[in-house]
Image (cartoon, helix red, strand yellow):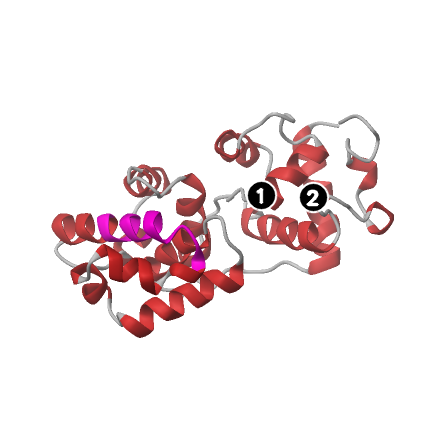
Amino acid sequence: MDLEQKAELVSDALEKLYGAPEPDTEENVLDCLMLTVLSQNTNDVNRDKGFAALKERLPTWEKVLNADVGEIADAIKIAGLSGQKSQTIKNFLTWLKAEYGKLDLEFIREMATEDAIPLLSQHKGIGIKTVSVTLAFACGRDVFPVDTHVLRISKRLGFVPSNCTAEKAHELMPQIIAKGKAYPFHMNLIAFGRRICDARKPKCDQCPITIHCLYYQGEL
């Protein structure tokens, strides 16, 4: 069995568990990008609290742009790494306003994926995962973000080498995922990682895909 066939079987099994989620493509692209920046190295709860606090203090991106980095950092501190993230936000908004004259990323919807990825990922603090999440979630693109859950499970299943980095996995995983399946597969792997395939104590007795798992078979 090749990796494409294996990925399809795993994807089908997870859809039986969790369904086939679809992205909310009405989400504002700039909001999604900034929310994803805040999500780095934290959980969804603190990410959302940080974003809400930022919006409460500085309700528009123009106000965020005109604020001091320290004020931005104070607003988003619950999301962690506030100094780093605030600088990323400030730098990106400064670039966006200078380059396009307004704080709006909706033009990304009309841009080819292969052009959008380097345009957004050229900025410090905005890597391939952040860009992939933005394109998949806000724009409905068939791209595959790799977070910690996805990377861990991909290694256990043998989709990528055991020493594979997240960056390399962003190159390898799309090669084996069926067209149109990137978003549901991504979301279902996250759900699976949170509920069953835990990092420290995976619930292998509840797992429907042990037949495909190198970790379960003792090969990792």
Image coords of residue 155 (percent x, y): 66, 33
Which residue position holds label 1? 148
Side (left or right) of 1 relative to 129: right
- Which portion, as a residue range, is magenta? 79-91
**Residue contact at pointers 2 and 1, CB within 8 angstroms:** yes
Side (left or right) of 101 relative to 173: left
Say if the magenta span includes residue 80.
Answer: yes
For label 2, the SS is loop
Which residue position holds label 2? 199
Give the residue type at disc 2.
Ala
**Quarter of the image that includes the C terminus:** top right
Q: How many marks?
A: 2
Image coords of residue 37 (percent x, y): 39, 52
Side (left or right) of 99 relative to 215: left
Image coords of residue 86 (percent x, y): 30, 53
Q: Residue furthest right?
A: 205
Say if the magenta span includes residue 139.
Answer: no
The residue that appears at 34% across and 58% down in the rendered structure is: 29
